[in-house]
Image (cartoon, rainbow, N blue to C red):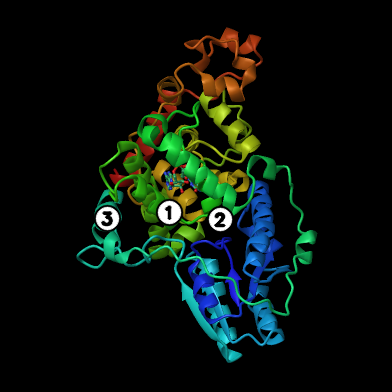
Amino acid sequence: MVWFKRDLRVYDNPALTEAMKEGPVIAVYVLSHEQWDKHDVSPAQRALIVGQLHSLEKKLAELNVPLLVKVGDCFDSVPGTLARLIKEYSVTSLYFNREYEVNERRCESAVEQSVKLLGAEVFAFHDACMVVPGSVLSLKGEPYKVFSAFKKAFIAGYGFKARPVAYFPGSQPVIDVSSDLTELQCIGYDSEWLQQWPAGEAEAHDRLERFMDVASRDYKATRDIPGVPGTSQLSPYLAVGALSTTQCMTTALMANEGLLDGGNEGIACWINELIWREFYRHVLFHNPEVSMNQPLKKETDLLPWRNDQADFQRWCDGNTGFPIIDAAMKQLVTTGWMHNRLRMITAMFLTKNLFIDWRLGEQFFMRHLVDGDLASNNGGWQWCASTGVDAAPYFRIFNPVSQSKRFDPDGTFIRKFLPQLASLNAKDIHQPSLAQAKKLNYPEPMVNLSESAGRTKLLFKNLTQPT
Ligand code: FAD
């Protein structure tokens, strides 16, 4: 039996490939409402997972592998559900790919114990990282806390540590078990999201191919401009496992003459981002507190974050009076995705100008992102809030107006998501005057940028150099 989780694909799936060597195989996916609610899985991602399960069922059917989807109320029910299926189908061994979040690790341990008690064997694999977490360590045997050092060691060891792409398994003889996705019908999800983010491995591969053919070579120049489609938008597919980072990296290396660094500067820059993703997964693996709402820099938990619900709501609603922030927040809630540059600008604004706890922002993002992923989301938030490993220094605070002028110079992005400002010229659109704002029914800036940034710097400074 292959237990699918966030690895909803048949290509490059080590657990599936290995299980099918032994065969015959049945596949199972267990989901619980409680897990989705507790983990703040967004409506967009719920829809993508449901869509991906339907697509996976078809792909597995081509291999004569039936897929059973089981829905339970709570996360703790997963081991019992798997144990029942193991007995019912006289399963001799369970195969799965590992996850690294605390709850997921606990669940895997409970599953392993119960499966072994039933006399079946367990085979677990690594698919979510390019190299096994825990295998990129400093000479002192410690995990890296700085991205550049991690990247250097990752590249040095890649040749012998990287997991190869799992080969595509051949189909098995037809077995006397049919796929059953009926329980999925009781899962409420909004299928409209699937129009924006169509499910399927084919979709993910098409996007990867298109990006490599069309945009990758200009990526270094265009990736920071939210008004142009300069990035791959593959993150949703990586988040649900319709695609693996290994597949992305292998494709990039083929296009870059095998070079992890250097070669074409656009592709090298994209590879760098894949390594950021890997870095945050390794950080999560080594620091269980990432899964438990704690900052990686312990002392920052003493910061007196403001608990101002009204200000937080204005940020959530895109009513801050700063067009680039408001347009970004509209992009998030209407499309389920936000451009990376804008994730940084909005997160810095919440934490450094409004001085609101990064955990609230992290949760709001998870609740709306189609690509919500604990390791990357937490890594991004702790970077912006200066509470994490290799975080932005607390005194380097983005000014959203300057960022807007630099990365959305003619206001293309702002105009798209804030049509009420579309009539403003390219100079005014980044910071409408009070008269313009009033006329266009747009809010006044909710905060003085330099004063608020100054207050935050002082609070951080006092933390590091107490008087
Ligand atoms: P591309 O630019 O095409 O990059 C390719 C892939 O590299 C991405 O799909 C992603 O997997 C990875 N990647 C790119 N940039 C980063 C980065 N800065 N950190 C880690 N991995 C990266 N990414 C998520 O996948 N899920 C999240 O929940 C998430 N939350 C974030 C929150 C904040 C506050 C910040 C600053 C960043 C967050 N990111 C998150 C990282 C990044 O913004 C997205 O991965 C990226 O915007 C996805 O778009 P893309 O697929 O077009 O990326």
Distance between the Cα atoms at labels 1 and 2? 30 Å
Q: Is residue 224 left or right of residue 359?
A: left
Looking at the rendering, which quadrant does residue 9 occupy? Answer: bottom right
Going from the N terminus, do you reach mark 1 or mark 2 first? 2
Q: Residues within 10 Å of mark 3 (few under 14, many from 20)?
A: some
Distance between the Cα atoms at labels 3 and 1? 28 Å
Q: Residue at x 74, y 73 (%)?
A: 178
Disc 2 marks which residue?
Answer: 242
Disc 3 marks which residue?
Answer: 155
Q: Is residue 43 above or below residue 352?
A: below
Looking at the rendered structure, the secondary structure element under dot 1 is loop
**Residue 80 image position (x, y, % from top left):** 67, 80
Label 3 residue near ligand 1, CB within 8 Å: no
**Residue 450 image position (x, y, % from top left):** 40, 24
- Callout in the foreground (3, 1): 3
Q: What residue type is disc 1 on?
A: Pro
Q: Is residue 37 left or right of residue 431?
A: right
Relative depth, front residue between 364 and 97: 97
Q: Residue at x 36, y 45 (%)?
A: 255
Q: Is residue 319 above or below residue 116?
A: above
Relative depth, front residue between 68 and 280: 68
Looking at the rendering, which quadrant does residue 58 occupy? Answer: bottom right
Q: Quadrant of the C terminus?
A: top left
Looking at the rendered structure, the secondary structure element under dot 2 is loop
Residue 370 appears in the picture as rendered: yes
Q: Residues within 10 Å of mark 1 (few under 14, many from 20)?
A: many
Q: Residues within 10 Å of mark 2 (few under 14, many from 20)?
A: many
Relative depth, front residue between 221 and 139: 221
Which label number is shown at residue 295?
1
Q: What residue type is disc 2 on?
A: Ala
